[in-house]
Image (cartoon, grey):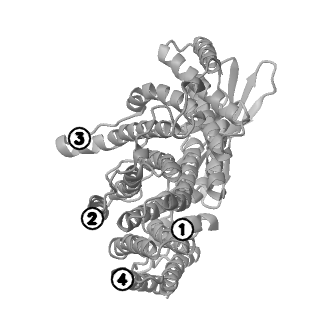
Amino acid sequence: MINQLGNYSLVFCVLFSIFIITQSIRAIISKNSKFDGIFYNLVFLQLFLVVFSFFCLVVNFIVSDFSNVTVYNNSHTSKPLFYKISGVWGNHEGSLLLWLLVLILFLFLFILNSKKSENSYKLLTILFQEVIIFGFLLFIIFTSNPFEYVFPTPIEGLGLNPILQDPALAIHPPILYLGYVGTSLVFSSSLAATVNKSINSDWAKHIKKWIFASWIFLTLGIMLGSIWAYYELGWGGFWFWDPVENVSLMPWLCLTALLHSVLVLEKRNSLKNWTIILSIATFALSMSGTFLVRSGILNSIHTFANDPSRGLFILIFLFILILLAIIIYFSYEIKNTNPSNNFFWLSKETAVLINNWFMMYFLSVVLVGTLYPIFLEVISNEKISVGAPFYHKLMVPFLIPFFIFMSIGPRLKWIKDKFTKINYYQILILILSLVISYLIVEYSGVKYLFSTILISTSIFLFYSSASDLVKKNVQFPQKISHFAFSLLIISILVNGIYSKEINSNMKVGDNLTFMNKKIEFKSINFEKQDNYNLLRGNFEITEEGKIPINFQPEIRIYDQPVISTSEADIKTNLLNDNFIVFSLLKEGEVFNVRYQQKPFMIWIWISLIMLAFGGSLALIKK
């Protein structure tokens, strides 16, 4: 019964979507000057139907209704309630239903927060957003219906992938979707403003809040994914240039460029065409990510599905949307008649433009590194993987000038500034940063001139952003975000240079020496939990003159599906993380043990939280 109600709700939602599209087209054609209240009611009812449908799926998971194919494939009676609920969006069908819910929610919030906007602009935004909603509704109903039946009804389900049964990953997808879906509203609003010829400072002020909201949620979503990968996968790192990680990074880079561009549009009424192009590109990247993850093309631990027909549907839908956007853009292209578009070479506008160039370059590198292996396999049937060395070689050299421009840019004035802003004191600080970084590199044993320059420019950026915190003439949200970014860069560099690791095979009773530390494998305990068996290792790490530290990493062997996972034990302080993980080898009595010392890990997470906090301040600031 619940299954049928959820399915019928989606069908009625399609009818509502068709009705909203036709009503908005009629209102646009008739040039109705009054924004009819029917749109509030229709979108609210559409939202209610999708919320109800989502609720039905949640109930199916809670009661373990295995007559539902989605529940059967992704749940089990022994699974804890929290993971039954999070399992709703821990699969392809459920995650798309959540995606649809957020799409309609954002449209409803847009209508509520656009009362002062022009009616034609609001109607056009509703029209474009409903076209996207309609496409996803068809995609869900015909290729990814979460309410399909299985007969006869199985007694038990297949269970959820154990590595997805984690608190961080339970909230990671919804937050990431808020970032992705927010780009759809920016896309719809940009096309509406283009058609309505209302791309100006007022529109920039209005759409800026939606750009900030998308950027904040995308930042937090990426952070949660990184934290999960760090402690759950047992690799001991927070970023691996995995294709699906790259898929989330690309719209973030584009959104960051869009954020800065819309500020110029708000302040100077400039960069109109560029802002629209970035809005379209950001949405295209978000949709492309959806296609890559759900088509099975990418080989990643994060991918949801392996169904080319689903990927083909999204690809065709994306092609239609982007083609529509390109036609609208060139049909209603804004002529560059504003003399303020000709920026003085030393001004804040120029600094923002340079920032955009760098972001586009970094985006291009990630895009090529992600898509090139796919095209190569299609053309030559040859499989390759693009890893960290590719990205580091192409991106690190450009980070150096990027840090320098980012250090100077926020201090420049709008319209025109004087070269005296770059004073001798700043040059002295840069020289001092070079000396400090040289000593750091020498002490760490890394013998690369490049490392010295990169560290020195990051220290210079950190000093510049930190000194801006005490100045009154710089906006506080900008101060926080720029300082957080500089802290993030410093933390990543220190983490990369000073991380230490040992990997060894050990039996109970063995010990080894590493970095003046003694690692002893003392014992193993066996425990039975609700839905898995647990092997808990007891390790003791001693260092001369310090209190011994006990570690208890785990190996979990899940019942359904039968999969073993390694759970790291991490001791964190403000300076470093001590990370230990072990896994069972085929011999049975021998375990592979990996110990890592990861400096400044906690500051990576803190800096990302501060980055999102700075964006949140800008969002709520009047």
Answer with the quarter of the image where residue 315 lies: bottom left
Instruction: Name the element at disc 3.
Output: helix
Identify the residue at image location x=50%, y=47%: 264
Q: Which mark lies nearer to you, 3 or 1?
A: 3
Marks 1/4: CA–CA distance: 38 Å
Q: Which mark lies nearer to you, 2 or 1?
A: 2
Instruction: Name the element at disc 1.
Output: loop
Most foreground residue, 597 or 159: 597
Marks 3/4: CA–CA distance: 41 Å
Asked whether the beta carbons under mark 1 and mark 4 sit within 8 Å of each other, the answer is: no
* Left or right of 340 in this view: 84: right
* Mark 1 lies on residue: 76
Find residue 415 and report its horizontal and vertical position in percent.
Answer: 51, 40
Answer with the quarter of the image where residue 558 lies: bottom right
Marks 2/1: CA–CA distance: 40 Å
Q: Residues within 10 Å of mark 3 (few under 14, many from 20)?
A: few
Which label was assigned to residue 376? Answer: 3
Amino acid on which disc 2 is placed: Ile
Amino acid on which disc 1 is placed: His
Answer with the quarter of the image where residue 519 lies: top right
Does residue 105 show up? yes
Instruction: Name the element at disc 2.
Output: helix
| Mark sitting earlier along the chain (2/3) | 2
Find residue 1 and report its horizontal and vertical position in percent.
Answer: 49, 88
| Mark sitting earlier along the chain (3/4) | 4
Which label was assigned to residue 18? Answer: 4
